[in-house]
């Protein structure tokens, strides 16, 4: 609610404005093309009528635009405006007493009671006359014409003319706002481009894109690989760090501390004598070769996302040029990264609170600007939760002020409130706990929190089914059925999801008792047979095509869960904003056994009557069903097909009238 001081003369009370994040401290998030709905409680003492407008403007503009708010019920008002630009918008509310509608309501009561209304009619005509100085053109002519008609009409005719809705609209167009109250804060909405909400991500290591075992892949090899990635339906191809790899304490195969002479090391150990964060690993090619990858991806209908990892190898140029940017031990040596019992001797963390932090922060910003100049507009940020939140608020704000189309994905598998704070201060998307949510109750609870609660205003969950760091137990144990099942879940529960390469080959060999890949690509170059038996390449392409062709799956906040009578079968749906596309999804969460479940179709939500017939087209297999009623049974066999994605349409019906015999 408004903050009130003694002697406050605001005449209208404005409060409970939604959306509003922590009193306007942080912006909410939407996408270009959305209609932005705002609601508020607007009231004052007594029974006087009120009017209100929603004020909004792109942040670069100085002039407010406005749209009239309409009452809903119980002093709740609403309005919406279109988000037409990839920028930040400000919005607030202004409300004021509506003298004309107050007068009109009073006159109607007097007329109904048979009272004398001569004085009241003079008052109404005067309210109409006061709009003349503000009106022009056709509106002024209409007001003058109406005043002339009132002046020469009978009492009954005057009453009809002055109570006419057109008269009220004319007065409402030029209201008296001398007693207006303005909400005491200006709120903000970040309007991202559509890929902030809709996208299928594919993570691949450029150095593994070659075809010869033991040979370092190049950017040119990446270009050759891109058509296959695009054919699977991905919109973003994400590269781990592509910079020169450190030599000191280089890791060998399976994270060994004793590398061989040809081991490439971890790409997250950034920097050597050939350069740092603004250079490319020579084994990959040149900077021009990288720009060629960006162009080729764009031609294939994809974007390149680049890893933004703010740490250095001991060989990074920063170490000798700016030793003050790092943590020093008492003996004067630089401290390497640790997460006990894990030690990362090949990585030095940066000290973002060092004495020279302003220069450090500016240099970190310049890295982003450098890669933006190379054509990159999406960054996956490595471990942002280990760097200061104020730094992210600053650097994201600095970048998006100039380049509002830049998207930041937070790779922050950390405490929930830290993940939420990163999203609030600017991260466009975030990794989630989906990777470890396997069962019906926990999936329902977690995805409801992400997509329907307050978090949905600012937190966009990018559901990665696996990463180079995480091979979850469900994939290790569940085999090919689990890979198919988890793919459908990730691709349909959220409008943005991702997989790490090798997923389509169902790679699931792990270091025993860990979530680490055995022979991890983080420490060696892989050459894969992309046509290997048992692959699900066609299945991935089919699921992504279903996503692309159904607008309901492009929305993030429209997820709803529905009942099924088997605890192993998750049933949920999405419907497009215009109601023209309805998708229902049933997934068997058990990768080992078939399950039969009765699902409860949300007929009312779909606008289907209990006696209506409707078509359920299963989009994975292409099968069609003609259903009636809301409780069909499904058999989902993980060895055959662990999931069903239905597009629901009402079956055409024509009334031919009563037959004649």
Image (spheres, grey):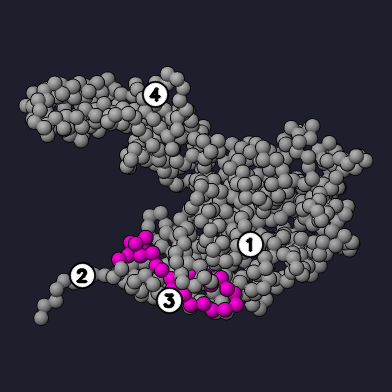
Q: Which mark is first along the chain, 2 or 3?
A: 3
Question: CA gap, disc 4 to disc 1?
Answer: 52 Å
Q: Which mark is first along the chain, 1 or 4?
A: 4
Q: Residue at x 44, y 38 (%)?
A: 17
Q: Which residues are magenta?
A: 585-609
In the picture, the quarter occupied by the C terminus is bottom left
Q: Which mark is first along the chain, 3 or 4?
A: 4
Q: Residues within 10 Å of mark 4 (few under 14, many from 20)?
A: some
Q: Looking at the picture, how far across and down is residue 345, in whole percent?
A: 85, 52
Q: Which mark is first along the chain, 2 or 1?
A: 1
Residue at the disc numbered 1:
436
Residue at the disc numbered 4:
10
- Seen in the picture, residue 378 relative to 97 is either above or below; the reply is below
Q: Are marks 3 and 1 in contact (CB under 8 Å)?
A: no
16 sits to left or right of 333: left
Q: Residue at x 22, y 23 (%)?
A: 127
- Seen in the picture, residue 481 relative to 98 is either above or below; the reply is below
Question: CA gap, disc 2 to disc 4?
Answer: 59 Å
Q: Tell me if residue 591 is in the magenta stretch.
A: yes
Q: Are marks 4 and 3 in contact (CB under 8 Å)?
A: no
Residue at the disc numbered 3:
633
Q: Are marks 2 and 4 in contact (CB under 8 Å)?
A: no
Q: Residues within 10 Å of mark 2 (few under 14, many from 20)?
A: few
Question: CA gap, disc 1 to disc 2?
Answer: 52 Å
Residue at the disc numbered 2:
655
């Amino acid at each position: 609610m408004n903050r009130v001081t003694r002697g406050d003369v605001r005449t209208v009370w404005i409060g409970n404005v939604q959306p509003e994040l922590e009193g306007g401290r942080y912006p909410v998030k939407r996408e270009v093309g959305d209609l932005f709905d705002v609601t508020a409680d607007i009231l004052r003492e007594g029974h006087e009528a009120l009017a209100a407008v929603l004020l909004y403007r792109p942040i670069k503009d100085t002039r407010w635009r406005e749209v009239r708010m309409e009452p809903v019920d119980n002093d709740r008002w609403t309005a919406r405006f279109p988000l037409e630009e990839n920028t930040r918008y400000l919005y607030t509310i202004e409300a004021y007493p509506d003298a004309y509608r107050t007068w009109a309501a009073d006159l109607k009561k007097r007329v109904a009671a048979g009272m004398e209304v001569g004085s009241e009619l003079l008052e109404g005509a005067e309210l109409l006359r006061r709009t003349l100085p503000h009106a022009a053109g056709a509106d002024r002519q209409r007001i003058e014409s109406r005043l002339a008609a009132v002046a020469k009409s009978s009492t009954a005719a005057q009453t009809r003319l002055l109570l006419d809705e057109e008269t009220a609209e004319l007065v409402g167009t030029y209201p008296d706002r001398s007693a207006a109250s303005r909400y005491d804060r200006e709120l903000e909405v970040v309007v991202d481009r559509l890929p902030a909400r809709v996208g299928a991500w594919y993570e691949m290591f450029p150095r593994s894109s070659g075809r010869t075992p033991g040979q370092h892949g190049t950017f040119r090899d990446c270009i050759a690989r891109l058509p296959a990635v695009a054919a699977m339906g991905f919109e973003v191809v994400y590269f781990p760090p592509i910079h020169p790899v450190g030599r000191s304490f280089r890791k060998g195969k399976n994270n060994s501390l004793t590398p061989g002479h040809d081991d490439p090391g971890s790409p997250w150990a950034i920097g050597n004598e050939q350069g740092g964060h603004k250079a490319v690993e020579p084994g990959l090619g040149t900077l021009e070769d990288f720009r060629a990858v960006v162009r080729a991806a764009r031609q294939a209908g994809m974007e390149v996302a680049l890893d933004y990892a703010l740490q250095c190898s001991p060989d990074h140029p920063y170490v000798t040029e700016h030793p003050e940017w790092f943590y020093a031990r008492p003996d004067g040596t630089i401290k390497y990264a640790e997460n006990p019992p894990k030690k990362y001797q090949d990585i030095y963390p940066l000290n973002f609170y060092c004495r020279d932090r302003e220069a450090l922060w500016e240099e970190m910003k310049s890295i982003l600007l450098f890669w933006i100049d190379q054509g990159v507009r999406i960054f996956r940020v490595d471990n942002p939760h280990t760097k200061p939140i104020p730094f992210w608020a600053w650097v994201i704000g600095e970048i998006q002020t100039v380049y509002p189309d830049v998207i930041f994905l937070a790779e922050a598998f950390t405490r929930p409130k830290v993940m939420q704070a990163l999203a609030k201060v600017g991260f466009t998307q975030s990794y989630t706990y989906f990777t470890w949510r396997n069962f019906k109750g926990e999936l329902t609870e977690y995805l409801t929190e992400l997509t329907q609660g307050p978090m949905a205003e600012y937190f966009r969950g990018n559901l990665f089914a696996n990463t180079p760091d995480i091979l979850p137990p469900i994939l290790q144990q569940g085999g090919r059925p689990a890979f198919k099942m988890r793919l459908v879940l990730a691709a349909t529960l959220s409008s943005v999801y991702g997989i790490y390469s090798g997923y389509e080959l169902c790679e699931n060999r792990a270091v025993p008792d860990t979530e680490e890949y055995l022979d991890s690509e983080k420490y060696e170059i892989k050459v894969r047979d992309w046509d290997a038996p048992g692959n699900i390449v066609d299945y991935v392409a089919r699921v992504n095509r279903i996503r692309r062709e159904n607008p309901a799956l492009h929305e993030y906040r429209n997820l709803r869960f529905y009942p099924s009578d088997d605890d192993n079968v998750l049933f949920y749906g999405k419907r497009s904003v215009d109601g023209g596309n309805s998708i229902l999804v049933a997934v068997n969460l058990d990768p080992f056994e078939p399950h039969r479940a009765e699902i409860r179709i949300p007929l009312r939500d779909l606008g289907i009557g209990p006696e209506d017939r409707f078509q359920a087209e299963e989009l994975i297999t292409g099968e069609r069903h003609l259903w009636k009623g809301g409780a069909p049974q499904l058999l989902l066999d993980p060895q055959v097909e662990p999931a069903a994605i239905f597009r629901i349409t009402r079956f055409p019906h024509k009334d031919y009238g009563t037959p004649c015999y």
